[in-house]
Amino acid sequence: MGFERLARAYAERLGPARAAAARGDKVVGLVGAAIPRELVLASGRTPVLVTAELERPIPTAEHYIDPVVAPEIQALFEAAVEGEFEFLDLLVISRPYAQLYYYLKEIYRLGRAPKLPPLAIYDLIQSRREAVRAYNLGRTRALAERLAREAPRAIDEASLGAAIAEGNAVRALQRRLQALRWQGRVSGTEALQALGAGWFVSPKEYAAALEAWLGQLDGAPARSGTRVVVSTAEPFTHTGLHEALEGAGMLVVAEDDAFGSRAAGEDVGTGGDLIEAIAEKVWLDVATPAVNPYEDREAWFRAQAARPDVEAVVFYVPPSDRQFGWDLPRLAHFVAGLPKPALLVREDAADPAGRAAISAKAAEFLRAPSLKPALPELVR
């Protein structure tokens, strides 16, 4: 029953958090992967990732927000203004979504968002330069102080240590799941749901369900399919791309995204200043497109793409992309030099028509008599 529980949590998203709030628990919404959940847990609250429904109508966002702003931000704005996050004790927005924070502050100032929860921004700079270390630690301490206000319990060494232990236990299980993916014992679509569920339920409940499912997978036969790694321009908050690719005969063994196979990363350190250890984790070990310089951002992808058991690479650059397209030619040249075939997907996998087109394109790609790197298409 492990996977059924995980899939249900992944599909319901805010459902478990709403139920917790109805029981009287305090819930904190998080926009973006680079926000320390351990601080929320240490304060006695429940953290939950807030994701965008990209297919929803956005009449209010269209009125207030410039159309060049990413669809993800517009959809989150619409949901917030409509009151979908009213049950939250606090909504914490990470730096890559700073536009959302300022749009919401302004519409609240105008008196047109009465159901908006209290807001906070976690302004972590994802530059790897040593010069930003002190600033990022300061922002993390400031978030801890914000969470400590009217908190159900004190944020101290004991509560921080317990929260870190819960998070590290989850990371160990997620790394075990990724190892099984490399063995071909689980599909990418299932893995994405299992990894993503960890953002929407409590660590203890999630760990119990994931461990139960992993026990069933240990003896599972290897799956067939062309083994691919995916590099993506946007967070994988849905399974559309994986479903389309695997329906055509691929097996997605990894994706360069914090909502996929990079969800776990390394453990949070348990020695010394625990808030500093938490800050180090979200600063140096969370995968987002905002990581700078690009060599640090791309190191993981390059290592996975070069593995001998990876047969092809898929670049996912949907119409919503505002940044990744600048990096694509460089990455395409790298893959061509391996050499390995590469497929460029520009259709929107969140849209049913887009998924059908992706599946057809992937099937045609796999039927090619000679899988050569598709560099001309990628750099066009």
Image (cartoon, rainbow, N blue to C red):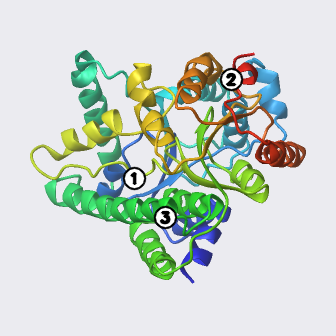
The mark nearer the N terminus, 1 or 3, is 3
Q: In front here: 256 or 39?
A: 256
Q: Residue furthest front?
A: 369
Q: Give the secondary structure at mark 3.
A: loop
What residue would you read off at disc 2? 375
Q: Residues within 10 Å of mark 3 (few under 14, many from 20)?
A: some
Disc 1 vs disc 3: Cβ atoms closer than 8 Å?
Answer: no
Q: Residues within 10 Å of mark 1 (few under 14, many from 20)?
A: many
Please give the name of the residue rendered at 54% of the width and 47% of the height, measured from the top-left corner. 310
**Mark drawn on residue 183:** 3
Residue 164 lies, in percent from the top left, at: 26, 57
**Could you say which quadrant of the image residue 347 lies in?**
top right
Q: Give the secondary structure at mark 1.
A: loop
The mark nearer the N terminus, 2 or 3, is 3
* Mark 2 to mark 1 CA distance (whole Å): 32 Å
Please give the name of the residue rendered at 74% of the width and 32% of the height, measured from the top-left corner. 318
Residue 338 in the figure: left or right of residue 245: left
Asked if residue 181 shows in the view, the reply is yes
**Mark drawn on residue 264:** 1
Q: Callout 1, which amino acid?
A: Ala
* Mark 2 to mark 3 CA distance (whole Å): 29 Å
Q: Callout 3, which amino acid?
A: Gln
Q: Give the secondary structure at mark 2.
A: helix
Q: In front here: 253 or 126?
A: 253
**Could you say which quadrant of the image residue 146 lies in?**
top left
Q: Callout 2, which amino acid?
A: Leu
Residue 4 lies, in percent from the top left, at: 62, 77
* Mark 1 to mark 3 CA distance (whole Å): 18 Å
